Amino acid sequence: MLPVIAQVALDLPVPRLFDYLAPTLTAADVGRRVCVPFGRKELLGIVLAVGHKSDHPVARLKPISQVLDDAPILPAEVLKLLQFCSDYYHHPLGATVLSALPTALRKPQPYTLKTTSAWQLTESGQRAEIPARAHGQRALFTLLADGAVHPAASLAAASASYRSTLKHWLELGWVSLLSTIAPLNNNAVVADIAPVLNPEQASAVEKISAATGQFQPFLLHGVTGSGKTEVYLHLVQAALAQGGQVLVLVPEINLTPQLTGVFRARFPDVEIATLNSGMNDGDRLQHWLAASAGRARIVLGTRLAVFTPLPQLALIIIDEEHDSSFYQQDGLRYAARDVAIIRAQQRNIPIMLGSATPALETWHNAQTGRYQRLSLTQRAISAATLPSIRLVDLRTQKCDAGISPALSAAIQQRLDLQQQSLIFINRRGYAPTLVCRACGWNAGCPRCSVRLVVHLRDKQLRCHHCGYAQRVPHACPDCGNVDISPTGVGTQRLEEKLQQQFPTARVLRIDRDSTRRKDSWATMQQQIRAGEVDILIGTQLLAKGHDFPNLTLVGVIDADSALYSPDFRASERLFSQLMQVSGRAGRAQHTGEVLIQTEFIDHPLYRALQKHDYIGYAKTLLNERRSASFPPYIHQAVLRAEAEYVQDALAFLSEAKAQASDNEHISLFDPTPAALTRKANVERALLLVQSPNRRVLQGFLQEWISRVYKMKANKLRWHLDVDPWEI
DNA sequence: ATGCCTGCAGCG
DNA sequence: GCTGCAGGCATG
């Protein structure tokens, strides 16, 4: 009789599986959680195959120590997707598989679910006699006397010591305890009625619905306010009507109670699972299991939700598909949008990507016909028109603390009209730093190769990359000169300036500092909506998704820095960001105005922006990308190395480069220090590989990386980044 | 990743 | 010769 051997995935940084004796398992146990002995401890593993062969001496195999749960936790379909990710992103299969599980399922033990308990009087309990003086107990008994099932929460009011009383009664056999798994959505909502779609929206819904049951990616290209969400809701409705589950992926910042509320209100009778990294382990598990059991029919989640088992999955929707938060930047480095496409392909279902400013890769796919493009050109609220965009020439306007007279006048005008203004700062490459006018010294992070940012409020210099902080010095540490002052415009300095200029205006600054407290951002949103704020100052956070009806002016302080960026995606991102922030102006009854301060008023980016012309600018950028051989006309991968000294990282990469086999269709560049060389006391370098052919690149990487794994890398960490978002 | 084994510097 | 830490290596 041949021994039964299971191949088990373990969360280890080695690209292979481990075999164990598993006499009780069969092929039906693939995807199951098991505990296995590994070295001197127990690890959690997932069974990936059950057979009779092993590449390891069978006599030295250890048996699985425990088979967990009553059924496999990952279905074959998800395992296949994970296998693809492991191959494509060249990440160890075990680590890839385990990363798809919520943390609560990664522990080598059975899981426990949160339950709500309810109590009921038993037959003998009905006849119980409670001492007359035990008031608390009598009150509790009175509540239970009707013989019905009472949730623990409703009994709490009867007696302060209800818990111990019930426990005692349970021992006496007077009451019985019923535990039920808590439902996901227990808050009542007011149902919302679906509005009538405009012809463009209706046609989009119709086309996507027609693709039910077949793989077809769609790009829903629609300006802010054109009603993409309504299209999503109608598609969800249609998919649910046919008994399907829908996966809706949204950027990190968009997964708010507000969005969840929209879905709950439209589908009040449907269980909705939400999945994002901010949830606690217990809730995550609860929602994940509800989705995986097919009970939760709608799954609203961030990138990590792309791997959730969904037995009835019928449609995938990705909102704001160009958003950078769909890229996982550590561990398994994947692009959730691309993984979702593969998932839709494997499952043969339609997938819809929605955006006002699609990623150029996506746009290119729509141009070549791989994706079907659907456009929404009208703003759904017919009275609202697109904001007018005005460029302020910084070469002719003299600025005070970054604010031009033109912008200043525009703000005053809004104040007079009792409307709101938003001053937007493009934080990338724009923050106040400390400079000595005498010797040129500037405050740098001792651990990273970046300048420290001045935070006047708490008199600190802070590193925005590693979090280092120190007090602002009174004099230059190099030459002793006391004339050291912040340069550039930060949100705090801007806030002070605006407050000086408009003393009666109510100014609110919104950035990571001011929204750090858990619910302060929600509170601020309410304040803004209630009209308790006149001028808003903000960064990225404000650009996204929120609709403030009384906001009619958006001022962009300095956008130009992205135009000098060495990153070839910087202008794509700037355009998309400015389009988004422009969408903040005038969404309700008032027409909005956007003022952009720039030194390059003729730059094609700003010209296109003025015309709200994504299509034209995408064409320009794609032409540039084609002639410069950048993505999407080339496929890239980056080997990154981190060490104490950049030389060691560079040496490792040089050795790796030497290991590569020659291939005429592959370009291997020279190792180079990363743009931000030093970060949190590690120095980083990278090696870029590219090829016009994705398959060729994949074939090359597979062979190359297997050799890199064999290289000795002491005190050095390395990883491969396929289709990097940033180099 | 983590823990164990081996090898050589430092000590007496 | 013994202890201690670094680097190499196996973990099934």
Image (cartoon, coloured by chain):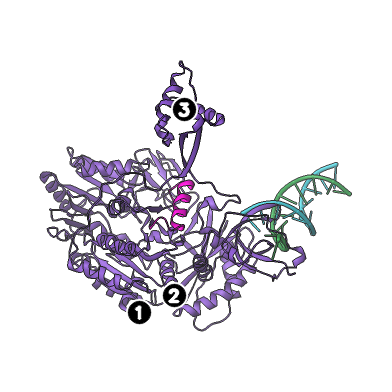
Chain colours: A purple, B cyan, C green
Q: CA–CA distance between discs 3 and 1?
A: 75 Å
Task: Please name the residue that numbered disc 2 is placed on.
Answer: A635
Q: Nearer the viewer, residue A294 or A507?
A: A294
Name which residue type carries label 1. Answer: Ser
Q: Residue furthest bottom?
A: A664
Judged left or right of residue A709, residue A639 is left
Judged left or right of residue A67, residue A641 is left
Name the secondary structure under disc 2: strand
Callout 1: 10 Å neighbours few (<14), some, many (20+)?
Answer: few
Task: Please name the residue that numbered disc 3 is placed on.
Answer: A162
The image's mark for residue A627 is: 1
Judged left or right of residue A572, residue A53 is right
Q: Report the mark closest to the observer, 3 or 1.
A: 3
Which image quarter holds the C terminus of chain A?
A: bottom left
Chain letter belonging to callout 2: A
Give the percent coordinates (x, y) of residue A98: 55, 59
Give the percent coordinates (x, y) of residue A350: 36, 70
Callout 3: 10 Å neighbours few (<14), some, many (20+)?
Answer: some
Q: Nearer the viewer, residue A286 or A524?
A: A286
Name which residue type carries label 2. Answer: His
Name which residue type carries label 3. Answer: Tyr
Question: Is residue A425 a member of the stretch shown in magenta?
Answer: no
Q: Report the mark closest to the observer, 2 or 1.
A: 2
Magenta-colored span: A277-297
Res A156 seen here: no
Reply above or below: A219 against A11: below
Say whether disc 2 or disc 1 marks the residue closer to the N-terminus. 1
Q: CA–CA distance between discs 3 and 2?
A: 65 Å
